[in-house]
Image (cartoon, grey):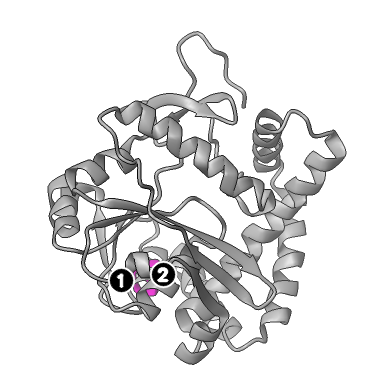
Amino acid sequence: MGHLLSHVGVAFMRLLAFLPLPWLRALGWVFGWVLYGLIRSRRYVVRTNLRLCFPQWDERHIRSLSIETFIRFAQAWLDRSWLWHGAPEVTRRRLRLTGAVAELQGEAPTVIFAPHFMGLDAGWTALTQQLPRRFTTIYTNQANPVVDAWILAGRRRFGQGRLFGRIDGVKAIVAALREGEPLYLLPDMNFGPEDSVFVPFYGVPAATVPSLSRFAKLGRAKVVPVVTRMTAAGYEVRVMPAWDDFPTDDAEADTACMNRRLQDYIDTMPGQYYWVHKRFKDRPAGVPSVY
C-alpha cells in the first residue's frame, strides 16, 4: 500500500510540472500553512532553532519566520515537479545562474559549498543543466525504494552527475575531485557526534562535520560557495568567488569559519534556510537538550 501511494505521489508531481509557476507557488503556500498547523513537533523545532540563533527577535517575528519556513519548504518540494519533469527549456528559463560563474569553468579541482537553503535541488539542477562539467555529490539512500528511485532519477536528469553513496568512501570522492569533477557538498547539518566538531553557529555550539576543509585539502581543491535563492520567477543560483584563505591546516578553525560565513548568507534570507532540521540535536557533554 505504501509503495502504491508513493507511485501516486510521483505521478502527481509529474502532473504538477505543467502548472504555471504562480499557481504552483500558491499551492505550496497552502500546503505550507497546513504543515505548519498539523506538524506540531517540527514547528517546535523550527521555533527553537530561530530563538537560539536570533535571541534579539521577539515572538511575533519568530512566528512569522516559522510560517515562512514551512511555506518555503512546501514550495521547494513542489518545485521538484518542474525541476525533474518539466520541459528542459522551462527548467533552464526558471533557473538563473549568476555571480562568479567563471569559478566553475575549466578543470580546476573544486568543492562547492552548498548550504541547506530550500533551493538546494534547484542549485544542483542549474549547475548540471547549464555547465558542461561533470558534478558529483553525496547521496543518502531513502528508506522508500519508490521515492529513492524518483530522487535519484531527478538528480541525474541533466549532465552526467555522479551521486556517491556513503559506502563509496572518501577515496572515490577525492579521486573524482582531483580529476576535475566538482563536489557539491552540503556539510552544514548535524550528522551526529561521530567525526564532528563543536563549533559556534550563531554563538551556539553545533556539531558540524569538518568535511568542507578535509575534502578541499585532500582534493587540493578551491572552495566555491553556491547559494540558491527562491524568487518569483524561479531561483537565482549565485556563485560566489572562491575563498582565498581556505583550507588551512586547522580543520576545526576552518569549520568555525564556514559557519561564520554561512551566517552571513542566512542573514540575507533567513526564511529560506532549512530550520526544520534539528541543528542542535547533539550537545557538548553536560549541556542539556534544547528539543
Residue 51 rendering spot, x and y as whole percentages: 71, 31
Q: Main secondary structure of the magenta part?
A: helix
Of residues 81 and 62, the one nearer the viewer is 62
**Numbered circle sitting on residue 203:** none
Q: Amino acid at mark 2?
A: Val
Outermost residue toward the right? 60
Give yes or no for contact between labels 1 and 2 (Cβ–Cβ under 8 Å): yes
Residue 92 rendering spot, x and y as whole percentages: 49, 84
Of residues 40 and 73, the one nearer the viewer is 73
From what the image shows, is residue 88 above or below residue 289? below
Magenta segment: 150-154
Residue carrying label 1: 105
Residue 275 rendering spot, x and y as whole percentages: 61, 44
- Image quadrant containing the C terminus: top right
Residue carrying label 2: 101
Residue 24 rendering spot, x and y as whole percentages: 68, 77
From what the image shows, is residue 270 above or below residue 199? below
Of residues 9 and 97, the one nearer the viewer is 97
Left or right for 140, reference 287: left
